[in-house]
Amino acid sequence: MTDALKRRTALVTGGSRGIGAAVCRALAEAGAAVAINCRERIGQAEQLAGEICQQGGRAIVVAADVSQREAVVDMIERVTAGLGPIDILVNNAGIAITRGLDDLTEEDFDRTILVNLKSAFLCTQAVLPSMRARKWGRIVNISSGAARGAGSIGPHYNASKAGMEGLTRGYAARLVKDGITVNAVAPSLIETDMMSGQPGLVSRIPLGRFGTAEEVAKAVMLLVDNAYMTGQTIALSGGMAFN
Ligand code: NDP
């Protein structure tokens, strides 16, 4: 890791636990000040912020439902006031509503698209003016192997993650001249709360185990630390092929 991340400010949505928490730790270790977003597990986020600060880093907690525009705008203002303008945005917040195909509701579909996809649009739009003004930005979107394959959750989730990759390419092409890179990381099966109810899935993974949140964070850091890579998706699948 270069020193380029020192003095940078990062916002990680859904940073209170799982993949987001590992990304927050990795960014803080690289010297960035970190804003940890979560929706309701504020205690967990505060514990993580405390851990980072104890180790000499800088971190704050910004609770907000990132599927709501007003909450996002207010969150970005709080981060900017507390840590300075955002240089690095990791759109990680996500939900996985698991239901049988015939029980899936319109509400499940809408909520999934709002939280997994629209949130990334809202956060990206909100940070763009200051990234553009400073001619520097890194945006990493957490997609999924389910963007390209069926996966285990359902078509609503597939659609949200395929959308995330479209969003990534669409922004990347338009922001390249502003010094802003936009990439995605697509993990398959990672050991977090989201996957805790599905231990049987391990038999599908050629590598014989779930991935770790720290392994996903390493891929995020690779993208954050690279000025020449944009519009790409890095897959972490443990050897799984969905097609
Ligand atoms: P977890 O369920 O462990 O954590 C989800 C995080 O998202 C929490 O911090 C949660 O906050 C936050 N969150 C959920 N909804 C909102 C919201 N509306 N506003 C703000 N924050 C919200 O998930 P993972 O760490 O497993 O997943 C992280 C990302 O990685 C997701 O986008 C997921 O789709 C993706 N992914 C995960 C895989 C896996 O196998 N685990 C595989 C592929 C992709 P709070 O704690 O307050 O509830």
Image (cartoon, rainbow, N blue to C red):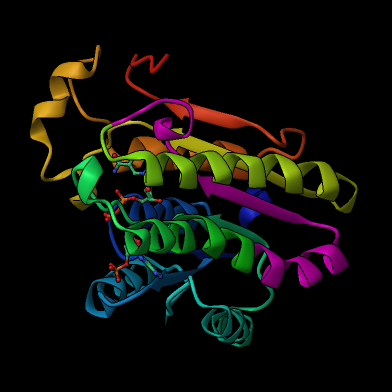
| Residue at image coords 15%, 24% | 202
* Residue 218 appears in the figure: yes
- In the image, residue 83 sits, relative to residue 229, either above or below, namely below
Task: Give the quadrant of residue 52.
Answer: bottom left
Q: In this view, does 42 lie to the left or right of 23?
A: left
Q: Does the magenta stretch include residue 133?
A: yes
As drawn, 74 above or below 173: below
The residue located at (43%, 50%) in the rendering is 26
Residue 98, percent from left and from top:
22, 48
In the foreground, 108 or 16:
108
Q: Is residue 9 highlighted in magenta? A: no
Q: Is residue 59 left or right of residue 54?
A: right
Q: In which quarter of the image is the C terminus?
A: top left
Vertical position of residue 194 compared to residue 59: above or below: above
Which quarter of the picture shows residue 60?
bottom left
Stretch of the chain drawn in magenta: 124-151
Q: Position of residue 167 (x, y in %)?
A: 65, 47
